[in-house]
Image (spheres, helix red, strand yellow):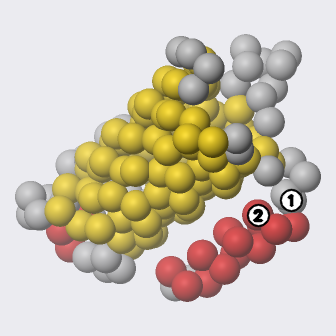
Amino acid sequence: MNTKNITLLFLLLIFSHSTLASSLVLGVGAAEGRDDKHHTVIDLGLEGNELQSFLGLKPYANVFLADETYYVGAGLIKEFELSQRWQLGFGATVGYYDTDEESLELGHDVEFKTKIYIGYAVMQGHKIRVEYGHISNADLGNDNPGMNMALIDWVIDF
């Protein structure tokens, strides 16, 4: 399955299940590959409503695309209100990773992505977030170089 098909599948899921979601996350940034070069990353995410009976965690699904590379994952995020406009959050997903770019090879198809972010509500229903993330196979493969990424996200609440 190529990157275009993955993106279309993800967008179809967004539109077909929009009642389950509360926010769309559009991100752009850079990831550091094994070659120590920075690769442009586009990140598309869908956040669900807070699960009241489960410590206030939110379900989260995302797709990120880079040079001949994609990751499709799902997991949970937790967000804390620092003030009326500021938020701090962290999250983790598990997903499928595929690349044809040797410098972005992470050693396994199953990868775990963790992230921490700080966000600012610029207006009602719109936030900007600065995010730092790491993706790793947690030693499932013989090789586990990991990859760090920095993103700027635009979050649109439904």
Q: Amino acid at mark 2?
A: Ile
Q: For this view, does 101 lie left or right of residue 109?
A: left
**Residue at the spot of label 1:** 17
Q: Nearer the viewer, residue 17 or 158?
A: 158
The x, y position of residue 157, in whole percent, is 73, 47
Residue closest to the far front: 123
Residue closest to the far left: 36
The label shown at residue 14 is 2
* 39 in relation to 141, above or below: below
Q: For this view, does 83 lie left or right of residue 106?
A: right
Indicate the secondary structure of the residue bearing disc 2: helix
The label shown at residue 76 is none
Q: For this view, does 110 lie left or right of residue 139?
A: right
Indicate the secondary structure of the residue bearing disc 1: loop
Q: Amino acid at mark 1?
A: His
Residues marked 2 and 1 touching at CB (< 8 Å): yes
* 102 in relation to 75, above or below: below
Tell me the CA gap for discs 2 and 1. Answer: 5 Å
Q: For this view, does 28 lie left or right of residue 59?
A: left
